[in-house]
Amino acid sequence: VAESFEWRGQLRGLWEARIGVFQALLAEGRSFVHSDVDAVWLRNPLTEWLTAEPDMSFSQGTIHPPQVHAATGFVLCCGLFRMNASQASADFLDRVAADIQKTGDDQTSVNRVLLEAGTVWERTSTPDYRLQMQGKHFSCWKHPIEGVCTELGLRVKLIPHSVVQRIHDPIDTAGRAYVKHLLAPKNAAEKLDQFQRDELLFIRPDWRELPRQASVDDFRR
């Protein structure tokens, strides 16, 4: 898929264009995995968590968007997810593309579309544990939970927060996280500083001095 778009310096435009790229991939019958550049893979999540079933697998967010968090106690994160090439996934993205014209935010629209379409989550009556963010708690489970959206014929899996962490998860005492997607500033320099403090910076200190043709291995410590 070859897609290009005009960058106007606003995140809203990026989110909208990104959804368009995802739609194009599904239209070609291609399943895909999206990972934000600041989602640091400590080991490969494709082997166990981002699998070929069900239609979609999402990492967990914290409390955004607030209206969905208030209704369900948890939210999906658009920083790491997989969509399989199914008609249900394509129909879902069509609704997200329409909704993002109102919200200007992909994560808001993904969560809102699932909620408004009546997605039912198969989970225990109480969460396994809760984490806190900005004075609010969000629900977490030690195992994946699955949502079923009859209206769209869609099945979606929520990956445990301890596997793909948005904030430090105290339940992960053995350091078994697959991905650390910790909240960090939007500024690139500040983000790298945050990575350094969180021991997630795995590139060599002089990486800026490497030639453009350097390989990925050249950048490693």
Image (cartoon, rainbow, N blue to C red):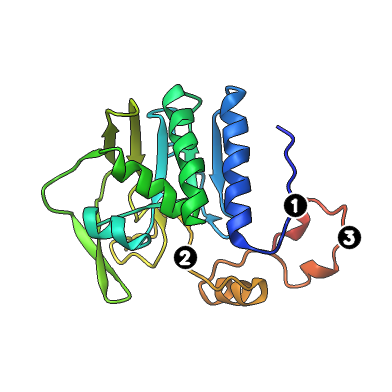
Q: 219 or 33: nearer the eye?
A: 33
The image position of residue 19, as x and y in percent, is: 57, 43
Amino acid type of disc 1?
A: Glu
Identify the secondary structure beneath mark 3.
loop
- Between marks 1 and 2 in the image, the one whose residue lies nearer the viewer: 1
**Residue extending farthest left:** 125
Amino acid type of disc 2?
A: Leu
- Name the side, left or right, on which 65 lies relative to 140: right
Give the CA distance from mark 2 to mark 3.
29 Å
Residue count near mark 1 (Cα–Cα under 10 Å), binned few <14, some 14–19, many ≥20: few
Q: Is residue 46 visible?
A: no
Residue at image coords 27%, 66%: 131
Using the rendered view, name the quadrant where residue 140 is placed: bottom left
- Name the side, left or right, on which 218 lies relative to 137: right
Q: 206 or 16: nearer the eye?
A: 16
Q: Is residue 39 visible?
A: yes
Amino acid type of disc 3?
A: Pro
Identify the secondary structure beneath mark 1.
loop
Task: Indicate whether 121 appears above or below 1.
Answer: below
Residue at image coords 27%, 76%: 135
Please give the label number shown on residue 211: 3
Numbered circles on residues, count: 3
- Name the side, left or right, on which 164 lies relative to 221: left
Using the rendered view, name the quadrant where residue 127 is placed: bottom left
**Residue extending farthest front:** 102
The image position of residue 67, as x and y in percent, is: 30, 59
